Amino acid sequence: MAATTDIQAAARSLRAGGVIAYPTEAIQGLGCLPDRPEALRRLLKIKRRHPAKGLILLAAAPAQLEPWTAPLTSAEWRTILTPSRHPTTWIVPAAPDISPLLTGGRPTIAVRITRHPLARQLCLAAGSAIVSTSANLAGQPPTRNPAALDPALTRGLDLVLRGACGSARRPSQIRLLTNPGKPVRV
């Protein structure tokens, strides 16, 4: 496993089917490209995460999420794009026929437009939304510090993109787009 601050190297690793750790708004994230089934399976195995839980997609712009979501109205996109005090992940209708490894077998998918500069640059450099789940073994607490990542996790990674997490002190809140006032996770 390599550690780097080079966003282009991290993007190349993702495009080659790699699984990487990277900083997000609150914690270290674990990700791959959502259209790489083998990378999705590796990520779940590395994290020891049950596939039925589904995964979050992180993007720099709505266009990176559109292949993964059912068509959304401009009002729905405005809701997703409206800044909030805390990073917000939205549960939205999924596009038909996307991998159940992403959705957990549900007709919805979790998406977030990131405002974290390094995560945004990574999405732009990869030319895609990226999977975003906490970079910890299932059941263990997440970390903000890439040096504190569990060696059992990092042994399976292709790369760790080093950088500071954002100012949020807890993972993103999760809300239903169909009922924005009702949090799934706060």
Image: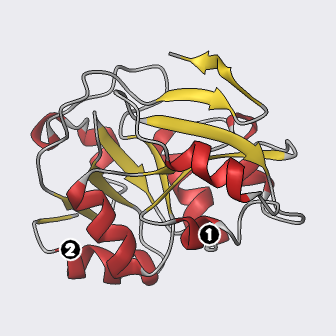
In-image side of 182 versus 132 (left or right): right
User: Looking at the picture, how far across and down is residue 122, in whole percent?
Assistant: 31, 69
Q: CA distance from mark 2 to mark 1?
A: 22 Å
**Residue at mark 1:** 38
Quarter of the view holding residue 124? bottom left
Please tell me which residue is depicted at 25% across the width and 28% down the height of the picture.
Answer: 168
Q: What residue sits 77% from the left and 58% below the top? A: 72
Q: Quadrant of residue 2?
A: bottom left
Q: Earlier in the sequence, mark 2 or mark 1?
A: 2
- Which of label 2 and label 1 is nearer to you? 2
Q: Which disc, if any, is residue 151?
A: none
Q: What residue did someone put label 2 on?
A: 7
Q: Amino acid at mark 2?
A: Ile
96 shown above or below 101: below
Residue at (50, 15) in percent of width and height? 186
Question: What type is the residue that disc 1 sits on?
Answer: Glu
How many residues crowd mark 2 within 10 Å: few (<14), some (14–19), many (20+)?
Answer: many
138 lies left or right of 68? left
The answer to whether 35 appears left or right of 97 in the picture is left
